[in-house]
Image (cartoon, rainbow, N blue to C red):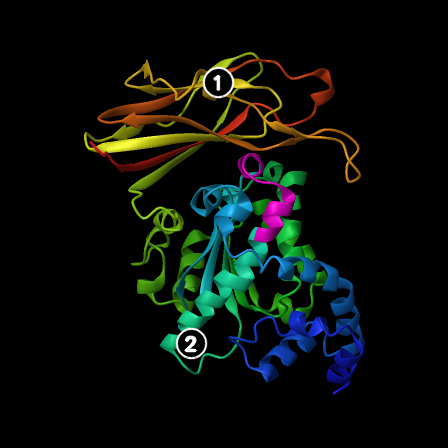
Amino acid sequence: QKFLRGLKLLDPGVMNQVYSFRDVEEEPYTICRWLRATKFKADDILQRLAENQAMFEKAQANDFYPKPDETIGAPVSVFLTQYPFLPIGSARNGCPVNYFMAGKINPEGIWSMTTVDQLEGFFWWSFMWKMKAEVRKAQEQDPDFVRMEGINILDLKGLSSSALSSETMDVIKLSSKVADFFPETLHCMLILNAPGFFSFSWGLIKKFIDPRTAARIQVFSSETKGIEALKGLIETSEIPEDYGGGNISTHDAFAKQAANPALLRQEVELIHVKRAKTTKSKNVWNLQKDESMSVSVYSRSVSGAKIVAQLNGQAVSSSSASSEVVQCQWQPAGENHGGTKPLPVCVELATINGPGMVTMEVQDLDNAQRAHNGMSRGYFLVVGDVTKSLS
């Protein structure tokens, strides 16, 4: 009652923050979620709501960014190859299951196509549009499913301590900042393939986490035991193929997020070229006789690069000569930052008709200025959208 009385004293708009899930969640569950987040300390949660309201209203004014491709500045399907997080299937209790392959998160790839402000919009969409859609699906299958909760599978396979860079942490902090508006939506979490350094750290971290939250998290270093725990929560038919189940693979699930229904597949590679050097893509993409590939390149590199698409080792002409050179654009100095800031660009490089083997060649032009030392350079995210040939 104290919480409800306190809400009436705050800005009326705060109600929209509290009841942001009103179309899929009944009021008693909403109130309970918010109070559980602060151990039923009404004053604490009221203060948190008041402090967060400005950020909420900004997102609300943009309808919580319903078009993620436009918000990010790149297709969601491409973004997910660099930030692999997506709900796939449901658990035995009806909860949507989110898979986050943290060992494959790639900050250079992420910032090659988007900015902090744009990424914030994506995280709002993840809760207000994507999560709601998953909960509606669960409610259609089971009318008794009433709690706004999900199960998170955090896969650390491939994670190294060096990968936990400041930019990686910036992405995770931003995600957590938005998640703060949706308290107590975690039913439980399985951490799979935990490396030795994480398992040791977890024992220390756990002492500082609320026991209620810590009890929901299980950590597995053994892949076999982790998969066994996964199958204890989720029917095999709902588990992705790459985790030993019969559901769609995570790779295919990401590709299905592409907005183009005519897309056969989407090839993605982050290429790094050293200063004043030339390098080739590691991947070779096979095009069939009746297939066509549209190649785009995303980058925030302060040093430009000449990028050439090749079919069977021969250069493919671009739509214009300038489209072969890719370099960041610049945001002028202003009130919010003290100097010029590199922003990502997208260049439509070429359209290639099969059959043949497609590769990329990247030559660094070494044209960055001294003032740009320390800024990102040499990273180019190449995307090949494969469709049926028109001819």
**Secondary element at tag 2:** helix
Q: Amino acid at mark 1?
A: Ser
Q: Residue placed at 46% from the left, 17% from the top?
A: 279
Residue 143 horizontal/vertical position (percent)? 41, 82
- Rendering quarter of residue 145: bottom left
Q: Which residue is mark 1?
A: 322
- Rendering quarter of residue 284: top left
Q: Is 310 located above or below residue 20 in the figure?
A: above
Within the magenta stretch, is there residue 117? yes
- Camera-nearest residue between 369 and 233: 369
**Secondary element at tag 1:** helix
Q: Which residue is mark 2?
A: 139
- Rendering quarter of residue 176: bottom right
Q: Using the rendered image of the protein, determine whether residue 200 is visible from the camera's viewpoint.
A: no
Q: Residue placed at 66% from the left, 51% from the top?
A: 173
Check disc 1: other Cα within 10 Å, few if <14, some if 14-19, many if 20+. Answer: few
Q: Amino acid at mark 2?
A: Gln
Residue 346 horizontal/vertical position (percent)? 50, 32
Most common SS among magenta residues: helix
Report the span colored magenta.
108-121
Q: Residue placed at 35% from the left, 23% from the top?
A: 359
